[in-house]
Image (cartoon, rainbow, N blue to C red):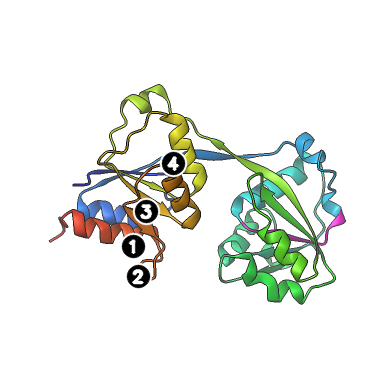
Amino acid sequence: MIKKILVSQPKPASEKSPYYDIEKEYGVECVFRPFFKVEGLTAKEFRQQKINLLDYTAVVFTSRHAVDNYFKLAKEMRITIPEDMKYFCVIETIALYIQKYVQYRKRKVFFGDTGKIDGLMAQMSRHKGEKYLVPLSSVHNDDVKNLLDEKKLNHTECVMYRTVSNDFTEEEIKSFDYDMMIFFSPTGVKALKKNFPKFEQGKIALGAFGPATMKTVTDEGLRIDLEAPTKEFPSMTGALKDYLKRNNKSIVR
């Protein structure tokens, strides 16, 4: 019987989050507690990469963290981003997020619909003359670089932020009493092992989102009880609801 679930993500901004529906329907408590946090590079650290933001005519954003840290660094370095800068975002929600920093209407903003870099290729290829800057996390692979190379686009990748372990307090470690934990990245799984070196899974159910997270869970010698995405359940909340339906009884009449 699952009663208390640790979700290794920040608390949802919207009250309409499916997690809250799950709490009501199955009588469980969801505790939102990220296992890592994102830190932006300082201007001094960024300058070591010898990249001048004004040498580029377009920026590719793969996450909100990239947006935040691009504009934060520009401000720190007293750089005014030109009005005609183009922005290419992997999904519309990131494109809309840019409005936090610039007037959307005045900019040339493009976005894909898959949430992945390949979904942007058609639009980026139509703008072959641009010089693309791609801000990334300190932990990244070469997938983006290889794809842009393949399309013969003029691009440069740079690191603008890093993920660091969001360590548990002594109090949190003492009161650790979850029936289930849900992970969304390999970093989260590794942070668990860092905070709890002697962690024994026992009856604690583990959920993992995405193949890289699943692989890390098994590499750490842990058992996966819930996987997402699947064909049937593309979201973690959908998969969780199904799991609870099979393991907990619904309390909603």
Q: Which residue is mark 1?
A: 238
Nearest to N terminus: mark 4 or mark 1:
4
Q: Name the residue rendered at 70%, 57% in the picture.
A: 102
Q: Which percent across, then down, holds residue 173? A: 36, 27
Location of residue 218 with respect to 83 vertically, above or below: above
Q: Which percent across, then down, holds residue 157? A: 75, 53
Left or right side of 197 for 239: left
Q: Separation of disc 2 and disc 4 at Cα?
A: 27 Å
Q: Name the residue rendered at 75%, 49% in the picture.
A: 158
Q: What segment is highlighted magenta in the picture?
A: 55-62
Q: Nearer the viewer, residue 135 or 204?
A: 204
Q: Which percent across, then down, holds residue 29? A: 27, 44
Q: Which residue is mark 2?
A: 232
- Look at discs 3 and 2 and give the one toward the viewer: 2
Q: Which percent across, then down, holds residue 184? A: 45, 50
Residues at circles 2 and 1 in contact by the CB criterion of under 8 Å: yes
Q: Crowdedness of circle 3 by 10 Å Cα count: few (<14), some, many (20+)? A: few
Total tally of numbered discs in the picture: 4
Nearest to N terminus: mark 2 or mark 1:
2
Q: Crowdedness of circle 2 by 10 Å Cα count: few (<14), some, many (20+)? A: few
Q: Which residue is mark 3?
A: 15
Quadrant into which the C terminus falls: bottom left
Location of residue 163 with respect to 12 vertically, above or below: above
Q: Which residue is mark 4?
A: 220
- Look at discs 2 and 4 and give the one toward the viewer: 4
Looking at the rendered structure, the secondary structure element under dot 3 is loop
Q: Is residue 9 visible?
A: no
Q: Separation of disc 2 and disc 1 at Cα?
A: 9 Å
Q: Name the residue rendered at 72%, 36% in the picture.
A: 42
